[in-house]
Amino acid sequence: MTVSAQHKRESRIRRHRRVRKKVLGTADRPRLAVFRSNKHITAQVIDDRTGRTLAAASTTENDLKAGATGNKAAASQVGKLVAERAKANGVTKVVFDRGGNQYHGRVAAVADAARESGLEF
């Protein structure tokens, strides 16, 4: 890993820690956590009090893996799918955790698709 790539990774982790100090998922408002890699994107609805994942979706799943997995269209599908699964578990309000990433591009696409599918945050 190059020095600049290592610095970017450490900066993202530092930002994520700073965000996680304030963002806490409860049973009433669980946390919608987004993880973004170069190839895939994953979203989870997490109750931090009990440490349970209530709903999850990822581009590594078989039905989403067929097309492109690292673009905004795939991120929108993940957002829609995680919102549907969360609503099936009785979750309507969430707190958004961008994972230290900039709220832009694929991260914003997940959030927008989840909002359009009925999640409030």
Image (cartoon, helix red, strand yellow):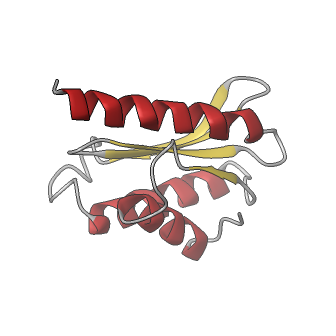
Front residue (pair 61, 73):
73
Q: How many discs appear?
A: 0
Q: Residue at x 40, y 56 (%)?
A: 78
Q: Residue at x 26, y 51 (%)?
A: 63
Residue 17 position (above or below residue 34)? above
Is 79 on the left-hand or right-hand side of 36?
Answer: right
Residue 18 in the image: state x and y as whole percent. Answer: 64, 36
**Do we see residue 24 in this rendering?**
no
Residue 27 position (above or below residue 89)? above
Residue 41 in the image: state x and y as whole percent. Answer: 34, 47
Front residue (pair 60, 110):
110
**Do we see residue 3 in this rendering?**
yes
Is 76 on the left-hand or right-hand side of 117?
Answer: left
Residue that lies at the very extreme toward the front in this rendered image = 3
Q: Residue at x 30, y 66 (%)?
A: 72
Residue 104 position (above or below residue 12)? below
Front residue (pair 12, 23):
12
Residue that lies at the very extreme toward the bottom in this rendered image = 116
Quarter of the rendering containing residue 7: top left
Is 119 on the left-hand or right-hand side of 103?
Answer: right
Residue 59 in the image: state x and y as whole percent. Answer: 29, 48
Quarter of the rendering containing residue 106: bottom left
